[in-house]
Amino acid sequence: MAFSFKLLSKRFLIVTNLVLVIFFVLPGLIPYTDPAKWWCLGFLGLGFPYLLVLVFLFFVFWLIIKPRYSILSLFAMLLCWKQVSVLFKFSGTEFNYTKDEKSLRVLSWNVKIFEGLKKEQGSSVKAANDIIDFIKASNADVLCLQEFNQYDSTSSDKNHIRRLIEAGYPYYIFSSDYQKQKIDYHSGVAIFSKIPLKKQQKIPFQSNPESIVFADVEKNGQTFRIYTTHLQSFKFNSADYRSLNDIKNKGELANQGSKNILVKLKRGFEQRGLQAQQIQTILDECEYPEIICGDFNDVPNSYAYWQIRGSRRDAFIEKGQGIGRTFISLAPTLRIDYIMCDNRIKVNQFAVANKKFSDHMPVIADLQSDKKP
């Protein structure tokens, strides 16, 4: 009996390890698959960090108990190293806010229409003030802002264009993708700069009402083209977040709420795939060293990430720390905000600033031309 139990336990662990490895390896295909056809792989991409932890634990377990069985997990991790390598980085350096004048400092932030995280009266005013104050303190040359909103009344505290001009960013381009004419309201993505903007342009997405905007800036005799955008979100509402909590806490999957979540997840993966393909084409045609910043609404194991990144440098991978979480809800592994740059640009510094004035934290990088003398 003892022998049978031991044998069954061993077989159970081997089969479990094998199944886990299959689910772990499948996300390794994501960079090479069209999400319009293989959108289901996106779910595994979201869970990839947790699958990695389990595969690694099996590797350690078998290394102690039966070393030759650890080869399966080791092989899986090596096979998916491209996906593993973008999950964490330990550069061992702290961000120095005293800026080297040779560097171009870029700050990218989804400011969540300046409404903050709290619902109390006056909390949005405080959040907007906190965001503006941090922007001033960051000493960034260029701001790339997503979910930026604007009320045109010059007397309003919600005239964020006026406030940023007063903060020292007089040059800007604003996409104004969504508008409410009756209250002079606009929202979208924006680039603000202390440095004069040369050519600037808005490029609408072909798949939804939002846009990519870009502007050229010159620093130390080098022209850089800076893009910013906001990719399709899952558009979860409060009911969806309640359903997610039910799934997390109670394991309730078979209800209408979970079905709505699946539909939104599927649409999000598909839309971001189309947007990423459009962005890749635009970036590849750029005549200057380019910088792309934004809220991609997707993790580093996603099709959208790899399509946009291509051979570009991810500033987090170059100079980041830890897992680089930028979205503060749902899960501790969600790095969905990025600064990427052309290989002709060197990343001197990068940080995710621990400022929780929005549901996203700002990312900031010091960049410089990597031209050889």
Image (cartoon, rainbow, N blue to C red):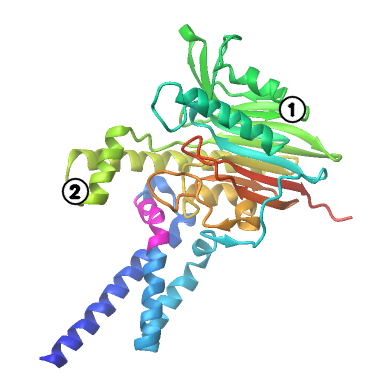
226 and 353: which is toward the camera: 353
* Image position of 56 (left or right of 342): left
Is 238 above or below relative to 347? above
326 and 125: which is toward the camera: 125
Q: Residue furthest top?
A: 182
**Mark 2 and mark 1: Cα distance apart in space:** 52 Å
* Disc 2 element: loop
> Residue 214: x percent and y percent?
66, 32
> Residue 282: x percent and y percent?
63, 38
Kindly identify the amino acid type of the residue bearing the numbered disc 2. Answer: Glu
Residue that label 2 marks: 252
Is 329 above or below relative to 343? above
Residue 161 shown in magenta: no
Please report the residue visible at 75 percent of the width from the left and 27 percent of the height from the top.
197
Look at the magenta stretch and give its main secondary structure: helix
Tell me whether circle 2 and circle 1 mark residues in contact (CB < 8 Å).
no
Image quadrant containing the C terminus: bottom right
* Disc 1 element: loop
Between discs 2 and 1, the one toward the N terminus: 1
Crowd band around label 1 with a 10 angstrom C-alpha radius: few (<14), some (14–19), many (20+):
few
Q: Which labelled disc corresponds to residue 199?
A: 1
Is 167 above or below relative to 272? above
Q: Which residues are magenta?
A: 40-50
| Any part of residue 351 in sight | yes
| Any part of residue 285 in sight | no
* Image position of 34 (left or right of 158): left
Please report the residue visible at 17 percent of the width from the left and 42 percent of the height from the top.
255
Is 10 above or below relative to 349? below
Q: Residue furthest left?
A: 1
